Image (spheres, helix red, strand yellow):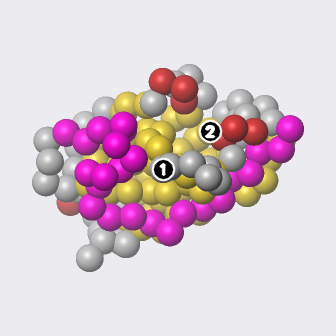
């Protein structure tokens, strides 16, 4: 069983930065893709960024491009999400997810194709 534990959430002012971490209980080399998703109050869960563990290829939802960076440290079994230029609309619970056994994972189905989930970490951006 794969366990994912997020950390790094908190409160920040608009324009600020935060880095989220997601520690995986198994070697990330046994995972095919890892991603970050978020759910704002009253809204459905949405994709933020995905990274292929084997080659480090990253994809982002258009609204996060240029502001967010996903990275993977396989030696630490940890995935990060660096978030810059944060906006109040980025306020949400951010979830880490991991997927196996598929050749492609999409950012646009709210993570329905991911297999394992963390419990989430809250990010609050004040104006």
Residue on which the image places disc 2: 83
Q: Position of residue 16 (x, y in %)?
A: 77, 37
**66 to 76, vertically: above or below:** above
Residue count near mark 1 (Cα–Cα under 10 Å), binned few <14, some 14–19, many ≥20: many
Q: Is residue 67 magenta?
A: no
Q: Position of residue 93 (x, y in %)?
A: 60, 56
Quarter holding the N terminus is bottom left
Query: Residue 56: in sight, yes or no?
Result: no
Q: Secondary structure at mark 2?
A: strand
Q: Main secondary structure of the magenta part?
A: loop
Q: Which quarter of the picture shows residue 8?
A: bottom right
User: Which of the numbered marks, if any, corresponds to residue 45?
Assistant: 1
**19 to 24, vertically: above or below:** above
Q: Position of residue 46 (x, y in %)?
A: 47, 44
Q: Residue lying furthest front in this view?
A: 42
Question: Which region of the structure is painted magenta?
Answer: 104-127
| Mark sitting earlier along the chain (1/2) | 1
Left or right of 25: which side holds 31? Answer: left
Q: Residue at x 27, y 61 (%)?
A: 115
Query: Residue 25: in sight, yes or no?
Result: yes
Of tags 1 and 2, which is closer to the observer? Answer: 1
Q: Is residue 119 magenta?
A: yes
Disc 1 versus disc 2: distance between alpha carbons? Answer: 18 Å
User: Which of the numbered marks, if any, corresponds to residue 84?
Assistant: none
Left or right of 7: which side holds 61? Answer: left
Quarter holding the C terminus is top right
Q: Residue at x 83, y 44 (%)?
A: 126
**Front position in the image: 54 or 2:** 2
Q: Secondary structure at mark 1?
A: loop
Residue count near mark 2 (Cα–Cα under 10 Å), binned few <14, some 14–19, many ≥20: some
Q: Residue at x 54, y 29 (%)?
A: 64
């Amino acid at each position: 069983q794969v366990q994912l534990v997020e950390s790094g959430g908190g409160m920040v002012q608009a324009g600020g930065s935060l880095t989220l971490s997601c520690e995986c209980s198994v070697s990330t080399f046994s995972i095919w893709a890892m991603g970050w998703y978020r759910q704002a109050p009253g809204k459905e869960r949405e994709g933020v960024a995905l990274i292929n563990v084997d080659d480090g290829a990253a994809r982002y939802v258009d609204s996060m491009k240029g502001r967010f960076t996903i990275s993977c440290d396989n030696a630490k079994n940890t995935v990060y999400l660096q978030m810059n230029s944060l906006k109040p609309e980025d306020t949400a619970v951010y979830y880490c997810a991991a997927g196996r056994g598929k050749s492609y994972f999409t950012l646009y189905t709210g993570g329905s194709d991911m297999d394992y989930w963390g419990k989430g970490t809250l990010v609050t951006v004040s104006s």
